[in-house]
Image (spheres, rainbow, N blue to C red):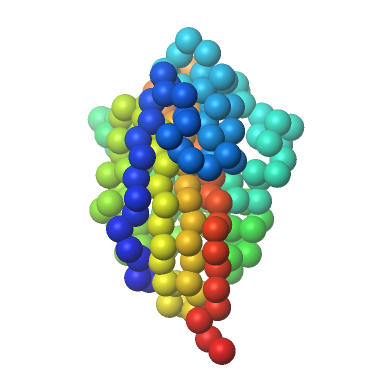
């Protein structure tokens, strides 16, 4: 995979979301913010995407945060992945860690993004353009990465990622 530097925007709970510059992503950020109430982030039980956001489900990912014995973030495990993303990936990685599913493609930059979302309860909006060699595809997409607290732990136990494809072009004739 070849990708260009991702355009990034960091948001926190107090932000309006207007800087996102995409109505779908702004709407999802607003939903997340309202669900958080007075807390630093919503709990998983505070949101109901199948009921409230059915159009967002095909490109939704929920990751479980995997920590070591000391509680330090190690990796992410696919808890749920939308049907459109399964179709694009050519397989369903549910239950696998990101490294098991995609190996070296879980780059240090992505690890830092997810680590900051988890540690700071921050929200991330990124835009990326990439060439996916194994699929012979050029893609341009935006993603919104949002933390969800555990119902009992008060720490970020789940990371919610929503992807919006702007363009996908086969590079083979």
The vertical placement of 164 against 2, above or below, is: above
Give 98 or 7, whichever is nearer the viewer: 7
Q: Residue at x 74, y 32 (%)?
A: 51
Q: Residue at x 52, y 13 (%)?
A: 37
| Residue at the limit of the structure toward the top, as seen here | 38
- x, y (%) of residue 125? 42, 42
Q: Is residue 173 in view from this perspective?
A: yes
Give 72 or 89, whichever is nearer the viewer: 89
Give 55 or 9, whichever is nearer the viewer: 9
The vertical placement of 129 against 160, above or below, is: below
Rendering quarter of residue 40: top left
Picture quarter with the N terminus: bottom left
The vertical placement of 148 against 55, above or below, is: above
Q: Is residue 80 in view from this perspective?
A: no
- x, y (%) of residue 162? 54, 45
Picture quarter with the C terminus: bottom right
Give 138 or 45, whichever is nearer the viewer: 138
- x, y (%) of residue 74? 31, 43
The number of numbered badges drawn on the structure is: 0
Q: Residue at x 53, y 42 (%)?
A: 22
Q: Residue at x 55, y 51 (%)?
A: 164
- x, y (%) of residue 69? 29, 33
């Amino acid at each position: 995979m070849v990708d260009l530097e991702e355009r990034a925007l960091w948001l926190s709970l107090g932000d309006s979301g207007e800087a996102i510059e995409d109505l779908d992503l702004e709407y999802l950020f607003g939903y997340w913010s309202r669900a958080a109430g007075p807390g630093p982030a919503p709990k998983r039980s505070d949101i109901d995407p199948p009921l409230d956001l059915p159009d967002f489900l095909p490109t939704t990912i929920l990751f479980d945060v995997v920590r070591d014995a000391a509680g330090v973030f190690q990796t992410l495990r696919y808890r749920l992945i939308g049907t459109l993303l399964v179709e694009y990936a050519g397989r369903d990685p549910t239950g696998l860690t990101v490294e098991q599913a995609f190996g070296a493609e879980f780059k240090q930059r992505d690890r830092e993004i997810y680590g900051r979302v988890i540690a700071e309860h921050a929200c991330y909006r990124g835009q990326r353009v990439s060439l996916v060699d194994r699929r012979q595809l050029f893609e341009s997409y935006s993603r919104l990465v949002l933390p969800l607290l555990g119902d009992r732990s008060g720490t970020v136990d789940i990371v919610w990622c929503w992807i919006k494809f702007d363009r996908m072009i086969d590079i083979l004739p």
